Amino acid sequence: MTDFLVEHFNLIRGLHILAVIAWMAGMLYLPRLYVYHTGATLGSEMDATFKVMERRLLRGIINPAMIAALVFGLGLIMADGAIRGWDFLLKPWMLAKLAGVFFLFGWHGFLSKARKAFEAGQNTCSEKFWRATNELPFVAAIVIVLSVTTKYLN
């Protein structure tokens, strides 16, 4: 298995990047839907439409993209471990990247829980909250990308 991962490293990296793009797109769009959903009257046609849009986005794009990003990311870690040894996991750039990734997993879970609250008509977060937190995944992406792209500047 490791030989396959090493041999196809660039393909796996490309698929990982594509999965992350899809995951991030969904994680940036879903809170925007929540912003508009907070203004919809409970039980209205708009409320029902937002519920369908949010569910489809989460289940059809965000969840599968997260799983793909995780699988390909783990493949890259396995390949990197075989290529250069496992000490890279303790390097500051990798710890920063993993911190960003763990934040994204947590935010994903928070958004999923919020979708269930909207579905049940029990949202407790304001439009202002969703507007203020909408860009958090992008901030995490900046940390992740800069940690990886600047790892050799030391």
Image: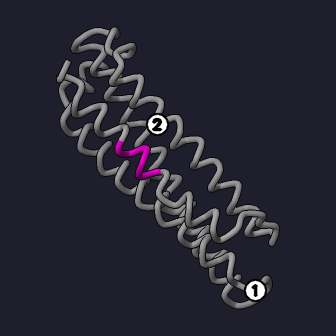
Disc marking residue 54: none
Magenta stretch, residue numbers = 137-142
Q: Nearer the viewer, residue 22 or 142?
A: 142
Question: Residue 103: x and y, percent?
Answer: 53, 39
- Residue 125 image point, x, y percent: 72, 63
Image check: 62 left or right of 9? Answer: right
**Residue at left 22%, top 14%?**
83
Inspect the image, locate mark 2, and give the three-letter code of the amino acid beneath it: Val
Residue 74 x/y as whole percent: 40, 29
On the picture, is 86 further left or further right than 117? left
Give the residue pinned by disc 1: 41
Mark pair 2, 1: CA separation: 35 Å
Q: Please, is residue 32 above or below residue 93 in the view? A: below
Q: Which residue is mark 2?
A: 101
| Mark 1 residue type | Thr
Verify CB contact (< 8 Å) between mark 2 and mark 1: no
Q: Please tell me whether residue 19 belongs to the stretch shown in magenta.
A: no
| Image quadrant containing the N terminus | top left
| Residue 106 image-quadrant placement | top right
Query: What main secondary structure does the magenta stretch of the protein show?
Result: helix
**Residue 111 image position (x, y, % from top left):** 62, 55
Closer to the camera in the image, 49 or 41? 41
Is residue 141 located in the magenta-colored stretch of the structure?
yes
Which element is circle 2 on? helix
Of the residues under marks 2 and 1, which one precedes in the sequence?
Answer: 1
In the figure, residue 140 lies in which quadrant? Answer: top left
